Image (spheres, coloured by chain):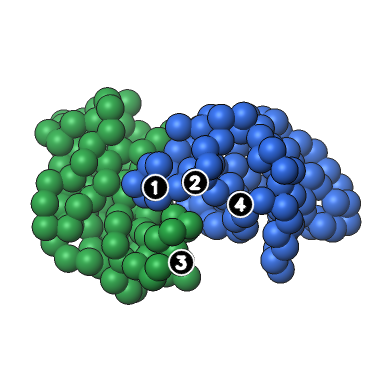
Amino acid sequence: LAKTTQPISMDSYEGQEVNITCSHNNIATNDYITWYQQFPSQGPRFIIQGYKTKVTNEVASLFIPADRKSSTLSLPRVSLSDTAVYYCLVGSMYNQGGKLIFGQGTELSVKP
Amino acid sequence: SAVISQKPSRDICQRGTSLTIQCQVDSQVTMMFWYRQQPGQSLTLIATANQGSEATYESGFVIDKFPISRPNLTFSTLTVSNLSPEDSSIYLCSALRGDRASIAKNIQYFGAGTRLSVL
């Protein structure tokens, strides 16, 4: 299973762009890169997923270089409500049969 | 997305008793899972709840301590047995929808969790 490494915590201010980088050197060919967001007292929530290059949705963008050994979650113009823990997961149904293996996550704190 | 309801949302239990947590999904799903999350920590997978058969447990978790049922495609229960203070944690269920895109990409939906405190 591909192990992920991401910063334990990050601080930002409202209106700034936040980039959280995740390292996954052992990513397998079939693996997707998926990010979940977790607010206090809630379960994780899927926010974005990609395989290569760039993916953008209404919440975030995900940048994946050609070697796929890392990925960067980009949150544009964060607000206080973006304060949460962000988890980077790497895997696939093929490799893990549905299991999600969570790493330590990045605790993002957005300040006014 | 799938809506997942967990009950109870929180409970305080005495040592030696058991707590059963229910997880209800608003649509049929292929796979359901149970996780534990210690305060301030990440999620740890307990087991995969298999419909109509015994659950598949991860290393360090056993059926006698965490019996799981999944009688149909939308419902599962996790029981935490013979409670001790070390079992104080948040327990979450998740579900993988049955559509082809969700299965291929393994996008899962989580309940809000059950916060268990053992005295």
Spatial CA span between label 2 and label 4:
9 Å
Q: Nearer the viewer, residue A41 or B105?
A: B105
Crowd rating for badge 1 (residues with CA inside 10 Å; few <14, some 14–19, many 20+):
few
Q: Earlier in the sequence, mark 2 or mark 4?
A: 2
Residue at image x 48%, y 57%?
B105
Q: CB of mark 2 within 8 Å of CB of mark 4?
A: no
Kind of residue sitting beneath label 4: Tyr
The letter of the green chain is B
Spatial CA span between label 2 and label 3:
14 Å
Q: Earlier in the sequence, mark 1 or mark 2?
A: 2
- Quadrant assignment, res B110: bottom left
Crowd rating for badge 3 (residues with CA inside 10 Å; few <14, some 14–19, many 20+):
few
Q: Label 3 lies in what chain?
A: B
* Residue at mark 3: B101
Spatial CA span between label 1 and label 3:
13 Å
Kind of residue sitting beneath label 2: Asn
Residue A5: percent from the left, percent from the top? Answer: 62, 29
Spatial CA span between label 4 and label 3:
14 Å
* Residue at mark 1: A94
Residue at image x 62%, y 29%?
A25
Q: CB of mark 1 within 8 Å of CB of mark 2?
A: yes
Q: Secondary structure at mark 3?
A: helix
* Residue at mark 2: A30
